[in-house]
Amino acid sequence: MAVADFYTKINLQYSSQLSYVSTRLSYSRRVSLRPLPRPHNSRICCSVTSKEAQAPVFVNTEDPRKKPDCYGVFCLTYDLTAEEETKSWKKLINIAVSGAAGMISNHLLFKLASGEVFGPDQPISLKLLGSERSLQALEGVAMELEDSLFPLLREVSIGIDSYEVFQDADWALLIGAKPRGPGMERAGLLDINGQIFAEQGKALNAVASRNVKVIVVGNPCNTNALICLKNAPDIPAKNFHALTRLDENRAKCQLALKAGVFYDKVSNMTIWGNHSTTQVPDFLNAKINGIPVKEVIKDTKWLEEEFTEMVQMRGGILIKKWGRSSAASTAVSIVDAIRSLVTPTPEGDWFSSGVYTAGNPYGIEEDIVFSMPCRSKGDGDYELVEDVIFDDFLRSRIKKTEAELLAEKRCVAHLTGEGIAVCDLPGDTMLPGEM
C-alpha cells in the first residue's frame, strides 16, 4: 500500500515536519496542539505525500505566559489514520519535568527523548515546566529537541503553570528548586522550597494521572518529597520517590576503585536515610562479585571512615572543583532511578530510593521519606527488601539520619498540614548542591 493511502488528512507547518515519522509507523493517533501564528496563504509540500496541503490561517492572541506553549514542529494539528494501530509501539506516556530550563534537565531531556530510558518502542510527550523568567530558555530547549529529530518524541509543551503542565502526567520529574544562597539558614531553604513542592503536590493531585510516579530531585529532596505527597492525598504515597540514586552510584564507584574491579561487579548497594551528609552508604550488605564487601575489602577503618565520608561529601567536593553542583551525573542517576522501576531488578540485587516509610520492616520511624533498599518487577512499582542485615555501626548511623529527617519534618509541619512548624534541626548538614 502506498504511503499516501495511510493518511487521510495532514495539516503541517513546515515541509519537513513529518520527516521524523517513519513510513513503517502506520498507526492511528491524533495530536492536537496550539499552532504558532502562520502567514496568510502559506503552502507546503508534505514529505510523505505528493499532494499539497493548505496550511490553515491561525492568529494566536493569548499571552504565552498564561498557558503552556508548544514550539515549532510540535505546534501543529494533524491526523494520521491507518487500518490498524501498530502493535509494536506502546501507548504514549506523558512526562512532566520541572526546572526544565536548568542544567540537569539539559542533559536529561535528550536521554528521555532518545529512548534510552523507557525503551526504543515507547513514544513520549514532554511537558516542560519553568518560570516566567525561564520561558524564553524553555523555547530554546524545545527548539533543540525539535532539531534532534527524535522519532519517539511525539509532543513537547512548555509552560509556567503546574496545573496545566502536569495535566495527565504519567511521570513527574521534579527538578526545579531554589538553591541555597549565602547566609541562608537551612530552615529557610526548607520553607522556601517546601512551598514550591506543596503547590506542585496540589497540582499533581488535581490533574495528573492517578498512578503518576513522582521523582523529587530538588533539594532537600527527602523532605520536599514528603511535602509533595502530603499535598497529594489522592495519589498513593508509595508513588513518590526522593532521588538518592546518585549517592548509590558514587558509593559503587568508590568500592570498585578500592577493590580494583569494574563498577558493574558491585551490587546490593544501599543508601540509607537522607540525601545529606548524614546519609549512610551501606557496605555491610553490599557485594563485590557476589561476595560481601567486608570479605573483599578487609580495611574496616577505611570503610567506616574514609569511604563513608567520601560518599557523604562527594557533592560538596565536586562543587569546589567544578564551581557548580553536579548536573550530568545527576541526570544519569535520574535515568537509572526510572529504569530501576520500569525494568525488573536482577535476581538477588536491589537499588536505593527515598520512599515513604509506612509499613517498613526495618523499625525506621514511619511517616517520613527515607532512602531504603527496593526491588521492582518492572511495572513502575517496588517492594522493600527484607533480607538485609544490621550491625551496631549501621544502626547507629541510621538513627542519626532518621533524627535529622524527623527534625526536618517538624520544620515543615505548616506545609504538610500537621500544625505549627518547630525548627530544631540537629545540625547544619549542608546538602550536596545547596550552595
Image (cartoon, rainbow, N blue to C red):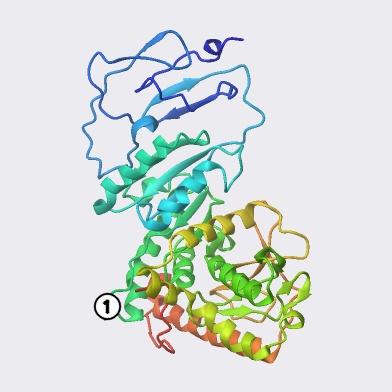
Left or right: where 415 falls relative to 63: right
Left or right: where 64 falls relative to 429: left
Quarter of the picture holding the C terminus: bottom left
Compared to residue 64, the image places residue 318 above or below, namely below
Compared to residue 209, the image places residue 219 above or below, namely below
Residue occupying image coordinates x 66% and y 31%: 88
Q: Amino acid at mark 1?
A: Pro
Mark yes or no: residue 57 visible.
Answer: yes
Residue occupying image coordinates x 59% and y 70%: 248
Callout 1 crowding tier (Cα within 10 Å): few <14, some 14–19, many ≥20:
few
Left or right: where 409 falls relative to 356: left
Q: Position of residue 12 (x, y in %)?
A: 38, 21
* Disc 1 target residue: 182
Classify residue 431 by image quadrant. bottom left
Q: Nearer the viewer, residue 309 or 299?
A: 299
Quarter of the picture holding the N terminus: top right
Compared to residue 251, the image places residue 38 above or below, namely above
Left or right: where 112 falls relative to 135: right
Classify residue 195 by image quadrant. bottom left
Q: Nearer the viewer, residue 257 or 300?
A: 257
Q: Nearer the viewer, residue 206 or 307?
A: 307
Residue occupying image coordinates x 55% and y 37%: 123
Classify residue 296 by image quadrant. bottom right
Mark yes or no: residue 380 visible.
Answer: no
Secondary structure beneath disc 1? loop
Q: Position of residue 115 (x, y in %)?
A: 56, 42
Residue occupying image coordinates x 65% and y 86%: 394
Q: Residue furthest front?
A: 260
Q: Position of residue 429 (x, y in %)?
A: 43, 83
